[in-house]
Amino acid sequence: MRPLIGLTMWVAPHDDDRTYPTPYTFEFLHRAYAYMIRKAGGVPILLPNPSDSTEVSCLLGVLDGLLLTGGEDLEPHCYDEAVQTDTLELAPDRDTFELMAVRKADELGLPILAICRGIQTLNVAHGGTLWQDLLEQRPKPTDNHSRGGLFYRRFHMVDILPGSRLYDIVGRDAIKVSTAHHQAINTLGNNLKITARSTEDNVVEAVEFPGERFVLGMQWHPEIDENDEATCKIASAFVDACKK
């Protein structure tokens, strides 16, 4: 059986300027995430953003794994901070659902793959904090990880910790990754281990759970090239964990 893997979705409010405007909020996801999961042998299931804990439990209860996708910023109150920048793009409904989903996945022992916003959600769900804006807040030197233009044309190197799950998966101690974020992990969450950092400025780029359970978060976007060697290995390792 192919494992069922839940993919979280972006939230966009009503907009009269849309080609097909409606009075409803939009929930959507770039197809690249689904392509990556399908190619690795999983079945992608798009998850809405419910706020009811019973519904969250029902959704997670039928899944074999959880993929936290990229997207908007988390509200700072989720990690007990006041807003300190005017660069935030927020989706409070998504925050509520994803934080509950991570905790339910932990309860059920589900594998988790967390990408970009996903690694930030994973960290916050375990008691960690974020740099609300890397360039504004993090001590220098800090590079601009969200340079303008198309993110699938922006890359930098990350150094991977030997002996980590990520190292065992990709088989290398450094890889080139796609960058598109202005936030990142500040204080590390409980039960998480840092396993990769940006070569240029030491920003946290990957975390994981120690032990057998597959929980892996990365700040970059592996889904932008489903044929990339490291992407294929990461997606396959995640789907294989979901099959078990």
Image (tube, rainbow, N blue to C red):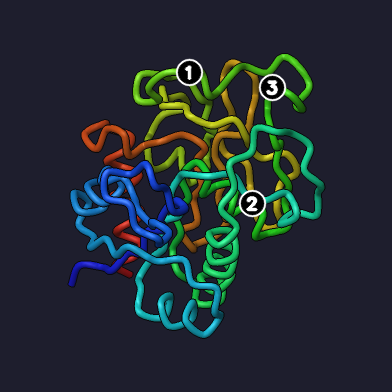
The answer to whether residue 68 is left or right of residue 135 is left
- Residue depicted at 37% across the width and 41% down the height: 17
Q: Where does the C terminus fall, quadrant-wise?
A: bottom left
- Horizontal and vertical percent position of residue 10: 43, 52
Callout 1 amino acid:
Gly
- Which quadrant of the rendered structure holds the N terminus? bottom left
Say what amino acid the circle numbered 2 marks: Asn
Q: Which mark is residue 135?
A: 3
Placement of 26 over or under 129, stated as above or below: below
Dot 2 lies on which element?
Answer: helix
User: Helix, strand, or loop for circle 3?
Assistant: helix
Residue 142 image point, x, y percent: 68, 18
Q: CA distance from mark 1 to mark 2?
A: 26 Å
Pointer 2 residue? 123
| Residue under the point 35% across and 79% down | 62
Looking at the image, do the residues carrying marks 3 and 1 touch, with CB atoms under 8 Å apart? no
Q: Nearer the viewer, residue 109 or 179?
A: 179
Sequence-wise first label, 2 or 3? 2
* Label 1 element class: loop
Q: Dot 2 surroundings within 10 Å: few (below 14), some, or many (20 or more)?
A: many
User: Which residue is rendered at x = 48% and y = 44% of the image?
Assistant: 71
Q: Residue 135, position in %: x, y?
A: 69, 22
Residue tagged 1: 148
The quadrant in which residue 83 appears is: top right
Please provide percent x and percent y for residue 201. 64, 19
Closer to the eye: label 3 or 1: 1
Kind of residue sitting beneath label 3: Leu
